[in-house]
Image (spheres, grey):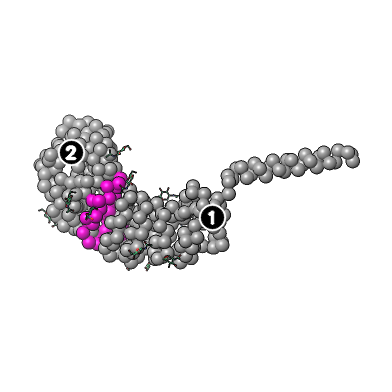
Amino acid sequence: MARSAPASLVAVFLLVLALLLAIVAAQGPPLPPTNPSDAAALHAVFRQWRLEGDAAAEDPCGKGAWSRSFAVNASVDCDCFSGVACRITQLNVTGYRNITEIPPALFNLTELVSLDLSNNNLSGSVPREVGNLSKLETWHFNNNNLSGYFPHESSLLRNLKSLWMFDNYIEGPIPEFIQNLTNLTDLRLYGMKLQGPIPQNFSKLINLENLMLGDLEGNYTSFEFVENWANLSTLSLRKCGLTGQLLSPPRNLPKLKYLDLTSNNLSGSIKLLLQYKDSLNFIYVGNNSFSERLPPEIIQPSVPLNNIPFDW
Ligand SMILES: *[C@@H]1O[C@H](CO)[C@@H](O)[C@H](O)[C@H]1NC(C)=O
Ligand SMILES: *[C@@H]1O[C@H](CO)[C@@H](O)[C@H](O)[C@H]1NC(C)=O
Ligand SMILES: *[C@@H]1O[C@H](CO)[C@@H](O)[C@H](O)[C@H]1NC(C)=O
Ligand SMILES: *[C@@H]1O[C@H](CO)[C@@H](O)[C@H](O)[C@H]1NC(C)=O
Ligand SMILES: *[C@@H]1O[C@H](CO)[C@@H](O)[C@H](O)[C@H]1NC(C)=O
Ligand SMILES: *[C@@H]1O[C@H](CO)[C@@H](O)[C@H](O)[C@H]1NC(C)=O
Ligand SMILES: *[C@@H]1O[C@H](CO)[C@@H](O)[C@H](O)[C@H]1NC(C)=O
Ligand SMILES: *[C@@H]1O[C@H](CO)[C@@H](O)[C@H](O)[C@H]1NC(C)=O
Ligand SMILES: *[C@@H]1O[C@H](CO)[C@@H](O)[C@H](O)[C@H]1NC(C)=O
Ligand SMILES: *[C@@H]1O[C@H](CO)[C@@H](O)[C@H](O)[C@H]1NC(C)=O
Ligand SMILES: *[C@@H]1O[C@H](CO)[C@@H](O)[C@H](O)[C@H]1NC(C)=O
Ligand SMILES: *[C@@H]1O[C@H](CO)[C@@H](O)[C@H](O)[C@H]1NC(C)=O
């Protein structure tokens, strides 16, 4: 007994050591601390929204309360690859009907790549400081109560890929600067108080996959801005004041799956849409001035086109 005691102690010690090493290995190397300016700004933002709770004392990019307590509708993501300091690159806070203000400190988070504040109750206008977030690729402020004009500084967000602003009260003409945001793949501006016409230079947005514009005041956009967009799969232009002959000359949209031209003033032959019959799954063209009518099955919304024989 007395002779085996040290041996079993050693065994226990080795076991504990192995366990600790396994835990450390599973967690990966320790993360560097969050950049102090990012940390201060994020704390200020969450303090103003009264969402901080027990995360007040925590490092935002650490693996503590920030990753646990907001599991449902808020999340923060960081880039720690520099090894020196973590930078906050993603902030999502959605679905809080009691969040009505955009805290100024938000615009100190200058490394943000993705900012999703959709489905809150934000009001007032979009602050011009949004232009400070020059690395933004995803900007989702849809389903809020924002009003006023797009600030001109939004034109500085040259890396934007996804801009969702639908269902707000933003007014004014559709901003011309959007034509310069040629990395855009997903643009959704409808359910607001914007005015047409759609700038014809939107034809330069060659990377578009989803384009959803709608509810524009005015009555005078021609369809010509729709270009030979190779990757376009959703084109929704409900109530955009589109006038004139449809698709003349026709466009090559090889990936088009969803087409909605409801409630415009388009005329001409609807048969031109036949060129998309191989890719299109949904088509809505009601409330226009076309010279022919679609087969009645197609006019009904939500009937998948690929279930319908094309003999028109
Ligand atoms: C945001 O940045 C400004 C200017 O650098 C600074 O004065 C302010 O204290 C910062 N706010 C927070 C909450 O960090
Ligand atoms: C909003 O509601 C959440 C609970 O859903 C609460 O934790 C938070 O303090 C509220 N924020 C404000 C600004 O009232
Ligand atoms: C944050 O929002 C973006 C854009 O809506 C989304 O792609 C991403 O998955 C979200 N992240 C988390 C952790 O919910
Ligand atoms: C989270 O978001 C969902 C959907 O947007 C919403 O129904 C729910 O009320 C939100 N939860 C909180 C705590 O705000
Ligand atoms: C949204 O905020 C306004 C104040 O700006 C408030 O009057 C309204 O009740 C809020 N809406 C909801 C759904 O909570
Ligand atoms: C943030 O934006 C404001 C308004 O556009 C500008 O005056 C300020 O210099 C910007 N701050 C930084 C740090 O870029
Ligand atoms: C939007 O804000 C206005 C005040 O600017 C307020 O009267 C209205 O109730 C808000 N709408 C919603 C849906 O919260
Ligand atoms: C657009 O995307 C490309 C490729 O992802 C990237 O190199 C470029 O910096 C982005 N920004 C602009 C303004 O083109
Ligand atoms: C688009 O970008 C060019 C080159 O940077 C600039 O001269 C032009 O004013 C911009 N157009 C709009 C409408 O912002
Ligand atoms: C449209 O783009 C062309 C070529 O880039 C440019 O010369 C013209 O000024 C632009 N038009 C408007 C209204 O911005
Ligand atoms: C379309 O998508 C492909 C594959 O994702 C990509 O390589 C290409 O740059 C995109 N844009 C255009 C205009 O083809
Ligand atoms: C748009 O034009 C059509 C036909 O010219 C007309 O019936 C309709 O009232 C016009 N709508 C608006 C908002 O001007």
Question: Does dot 1 land on a helix, a strand or a loop?
Answer: loop
- Please state if 2 lies on the left or on the right of 118 as rendered: right
In the picture of the structure, the residue carrying the numbered disc 2 is: 251
The span from disc 2 to disc 1 (Cα, nearest Å) is 52 Å
User: How far across and down, in percent of the image, does residue 88 sit?
Assistant: 46, 54
Residue 20 image point, x, y percent? 67, 44
Residue 226: which numbered mark, if any? none
Residue 53's spot in the image, x, y percent? 54, 63
- The kind of residue on which mark 2 rests is Arg
Nearest the camera: 220 or 299? Answer: 220
- Asked whether the residues under the numbered discs 2 and 1 touch, taking CB atoms below 8 Å apart as contact, a structural biologist would say no
Query: 258 and 20: which one is in front?
Result: 20
Residue at numbered disc 1? 33
Give whichever of discs 2 and 1 has the lower sequence position.
1
* Image: magenta residue range: 167-193
The quadrant of the image that shows the N terminus is: top right
- Give the amino acid type for the residue marked by disc 1 in the picture: Pro
Q: Nearer the viewer, residue 191 or 186?
A: 186
Q: Is residue 127 found left or right of 193 in the rendered image?
A: right
Q: Is mark 2 within 8 Å of ligand 11?
A: no
Secondary structure type for disc 2: loop
Magenta span contains residue 2: no
